[in-house]
Image (tube, grey):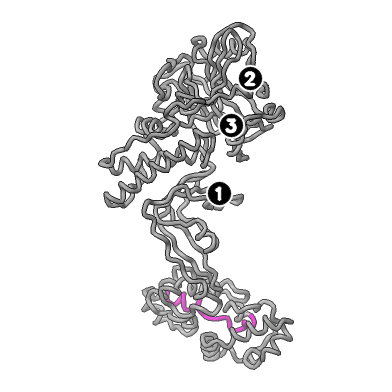
Amino acid sequence: MNYLLSYPLRLGLLLLAPTIYATAPCPNWQPQQAAENIQHLRQRLQALDASYQQQQSLISDELYDQLLEKEQRWSQCFPSITAKPVITTAATPQLTTTRHSFPQAGLTKLKEPQLKQWLQGKTDLWVQPKVDGVAVSLHYQQGQLVQILSRGDGTFGSSWLHHQQQLVAIPKQLTQPLSITVQGELYWHVDNFIQAKQNNSQARHQVAALLNRAQLSTAQGHQIGLFVWEWPDGPETIEQRYAQLAALGFVIDPSLTQPVSDWPQISKWRQHWYHSPLPFASDGIVLKQSRRQVITSGNYPPLWAVAWKYPYQRTLATVQGIQFNIGRTGKITPIVLLEPTELDGKTIRRVSVSSLKKLQALQLAKDAQVALQLSGHSIPQITEVIWQAAQAEPVSLPNPKDYHRLSCWTDNPQCRTQLLSRLEWTKKSPGFALHGLGKASWLQLLNSQTIQHWSDWLTLSPEQIKQAGFSAKQAEQLYQALQPPLQASASAWLTALSAPHATQLPKTLSWQQLANNTPNDWEALLFSPKKAQQLAEFIQHPDIQLIFQRLAQRKIATN
């Protein structure tokens, strides 16, 4: 169900109830920076709210809700920054809008702990799936349909009555001459939709866009269903209301409205509808009391009904910084560091953006709010930027020309990640088995400056390793692990050094060939002048020649 409210009202609701951000850390901002960012976020929420009221949803409801909760948390962190009234064009009735007989305020959305508090002392409870559609009010006079109103801003809505003939799910004439108002959800019909397995976040937008048109085709109208969730001026109990609505001609599926008396029953139905096929997309469940106090004026949420949403398919995450991993061949991979974020039972702290080009397209900066989702293999990925800080500082990017197969054989701040990648790759190379050597050991050797050039590990003694901060026993074990494989071939060493096209060379390649081959000789082996030239340039590089000298000292590069 679409219970999206305007920003001022929803902010008021969230201030009344605890939220998932109750324990989230406060941003480390100075007062002026906090004031600018909070007001900037409020303006973003205002723009999103205005676009939705015009049936244009720029982001999903779940991201909007999280963005609003973020604003509430920041307001709690900086209480001296007062909220300014937000006035949207939809707050004033236009010529095309009509006042609702009964306001269509949104439901308060609660997490499990707050929901359990809400349940205390309440009886005669019922549960329904929370249909992900477009809210609508239907008005009948003497049994005749006279108005179809969009939710609008909750007080005023736009008329969709011109679509009545195409919307076959809406009864045009009741079986009794009653004057009533019925509230429900217009949804896009999807056969056997399982929310836990499928993502249909555009279904609601599709319905809203179609209803906002001047004309609706017969086929489109048949695809739009109606789920009735309230009869404000109807009988006292929910059983009576639905029984009479069915008698009046509305299609009521009793399996989608179930009585519950305790938490296990509530959880059972939530899981059931989350994993079972339904004719519509849903984003949670609605809990309501059978007997309720009808809202006739004002635009605030009912106290007798709340929503418990399903796990987010996309969640909002805060960017804390960006680091750049340089691979052994010089490939640059940006890593976005996030404030710890829960998604599908996982805590996400970092996300790979795969390339500098993609990072530049996202235009990420510190404190940005990004949409996070899991890909098919449960790999987190950033799909879009939802909000940027008011004074977003651009990220300083490394120059791709500075990193390649022949860069960073010596340690320095700019080269640490590539050199570390080279060292870690060595023990993974075919023919090498440097057991007991992990990233932590390499880092300790680098941080102590025991290793400054890639080749330094070839000549380390136990005493040198011990001076790096290892115990005598650890130093001896590490010394044994660092012994280079004496039987490894020249081609195996080239592979360990990440030489271009090394895996295409014959395993019988001798060190003498390695030292004496000309580009023509390499071309005969690689069948490509370009590949031959690349390999020859790699081998003749001063750092590679130094490594060969160290290998010769160890009696390795001799046969």
Q: Position of residue 538 (x, y in %)?
A: 59, 83
Q: Residue at x 42, y 38 (%)?
A: 46
In three-dimensional space, the C-alpha distance between marks 3 and 1, rounded to whole angstroms, equals 33 Å
Q: CA distance from mark 1 to mark 2?
A: 38 Å
Instruction: Determine which of the numbered discs, if any, sits on residue 305 in the image.
Output: none
- Front in this rendered view, residue 558 or 316: 316
Q: Nearer the viewer, residue 248 or 319?
A: 248
Residue 56, image quadrant:
top right
Give the foreground label among 2 and 3.
3
Q: Which residue is mark 3?
A: 212
In the depicted structure, whether residue 247 falls above or below residue 516: above
Residue 354: in sight, yes or no?
A: yes
Determine the CA span between mark 2 and mark 3.
17 Å
> For mark 2, what is the residue?
170
Residue type highlighted by circle 2: Ile
Residue at x 44% of width, y 73% of height: 416
